[in-house]
Image (cartoon, grey):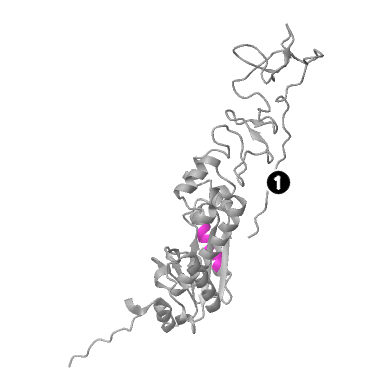
């Protein structure tokens, strides 16, 4: 008599098991507390990398809505999903990694370290971990790397929502400091409008200079002049409200006349006085109608006294430097 072989029940979830299928299978295998880890901002060229770890309540996670693939959700839907995750989470932890650390140690190294730190921040510690994309060594608990984990596992999708919403809020705060880059719109990713702003104003302290499209851009200078600009406002650095700029040279101009505060590139000055002069005629520049030039000296003279007059565009403007601002996460 043939005895049918004993079939191992297995722990593979069905295709139609839903977003919580993996967690239910792991619970049957003895792993009731399962955490998911995911990051946001890996592909951005500006702003921090945010890593989140979330462990959902095993008794209530089946009530979680459709939060798969947080990147496809609208901003309003992500905020609503974030509140739902907070209500269903037993524990969650977020790690924010600044651009300087990414430039110093590398993106992937920071990503792995952030996942370890996020897991270590959970209390209580999970019995099993699901990560999105690639395996992570040194977690200290059994783990499984899942391709597109935020689309097939509830805990990974929850971690993705927390990381994405947290980073979006940080980028909106950075937009207030550096409005010329449009961080509130593209969140630091390499969109055409972001690249145009980066080319025009140069990188700010929140850009990842180790990225090729940022590293090839020069220092923060105004286009065409090489003069520094304020990355927060886009205005030439050191100028006050109401100060003018020379239309051809970009030099600071007098607030009353609009003349350049000092001779720009290509201007000719007298060797004895240093006053600007017309390179074609040799006459002093910036004289008004009725001004008299002394014979032999070419100095501007008063029409009645014959004494030299000061030129209105030869005095440099005072500047006020802006103090750096600190980011409060």
- Spot occupied by residue 183 in the image (x, y as percentages of width and height): 54, 53
Is most of the magenta stretch helix, strand or loop?
helix
Q: Quadrant of the image for the C terminus?
A: bottom right
Q: Nearer the viewer, residue 307 or 8?
A: 307
Q: Nearer the viewer, residue 253 or 325?
A: 253
The vertical placement of 275 against 203, above or below, is above
- What residue appears at the point 51 percent right and 52 percent down from the top-left corner? 106
Name the residue that disc number 1 marks. Answer: 323
- Spot occupied by residue 127 in the image (x, y as percentages of width and height): 50, 77
Specify the farthest residue to the left.
Answer: 1
- Spot occupied by residue 189 in the image (x, y as percentages of width and height): 48, 53
Answer with the quarter of the image where residue 11 lies: bottom left
Q: Quadrant of the image for the N terminus?
A: bottom left
- What residue appears at the point 73 percent right and 7 percent down from the top-left corner? 295
Kindly tell me whether residue 14 is visible in this rendering.
Answer: no
The vertical placement of 271 against 316, above or below, is above
Q: Nearer the viewer, residue 96 or 170?
A: 170
> Mark 1, residues whose alpha carbon is within 10 Å: few (<14), some, or many (≥20)?
few
Range shown magenta: 110-118
User: Mark 1 falls on what kind of element?
Assistant: loop
Specify the farthest residue to the bottom.
Answer: 1
Q: Is residue 147 left or right of residue 56?
A: left
- What residue appears at the point 59 percent right and 54 percent down from the top-left corner? 174
Q: Is residue 93 left or right of residue 315?
A: left
Answer with the quarter of the image where residue 269 lies: top right
Q: Is residue 111 magenta?
A: yes
Q: Nearer the viewer, residue 68 or 138?
A: 68
The vertical placement of 33 against 166, above or below, is below
Kindly tell me whether residue 112 is visible in this rendering.
Answer: yes
Specify the farthest residue to the top.
Answer: 296
């Amino acid at each position: 008599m043939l005895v049918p072989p004993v079939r191992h029940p297995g722990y593979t979830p069905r295709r139609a098991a839903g977003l919580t299928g993996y967690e239910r299978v792991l619970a049957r295998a003895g792993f009731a507390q399962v955490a998911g880890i995911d990051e946001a901002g890996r592909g951005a060229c500006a702003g921090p990398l945010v890593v989140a770890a979330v462990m959902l309540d095993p008794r209530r996670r089946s009530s979680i809505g459709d939060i798969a693939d947080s990147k496809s959700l609208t901003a309003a839907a992500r905020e609503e999903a974030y509140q739902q995750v907070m209500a269903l989470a037993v524990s969650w932890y977020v790690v924010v990694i600044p651009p300087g650390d990414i430039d110093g140690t590398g993106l992937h190294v920071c990503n792995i370290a952030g996942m370890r730190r996020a897991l270590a921040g959970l209390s209580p510690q999970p019995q099993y971990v699901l990560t999105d994309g690639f395996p992570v060594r040194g977690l200290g608990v059994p783990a499984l790397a899942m391709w597109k984990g935020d689309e097939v596992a509830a805990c990974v999708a929850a971690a993705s929502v927390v990381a994405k919403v947290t980073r979006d809020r940080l980028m909106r705060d950075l937009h207030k400091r550096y409005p010329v880059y449009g961080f509130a719109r593209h969140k630091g990713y390499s969109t055409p409008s972001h690249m145009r702003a980066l080319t025009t104003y140069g990188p700010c302290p929140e850009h990842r200079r180790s990225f090729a499209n940022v590293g090839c851009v020069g220092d923060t200078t105004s286009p065409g002049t090489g003069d520094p600009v304020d990355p927060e406002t886009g205005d030439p650095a050191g100028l006050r409200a109401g100060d003018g700029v020379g239309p051809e040279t970009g030099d600071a101009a007098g607030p009353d006349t609009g003349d350049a505060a000092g001779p720009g590139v290509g201007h000719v000055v007298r060797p004895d006085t240093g006053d600007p002069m017309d390179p074609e005629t040799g006459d002093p520049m910036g004289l008004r109608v009725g001004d008299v030039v002394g014979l032999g000296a070419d100095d501007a003279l008063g029409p009645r006294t014959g004494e030299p007059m000061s030129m209105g565009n030869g005095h440099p403007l005072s500047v006020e430097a802006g103090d750096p601002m600190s980011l409060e996460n």
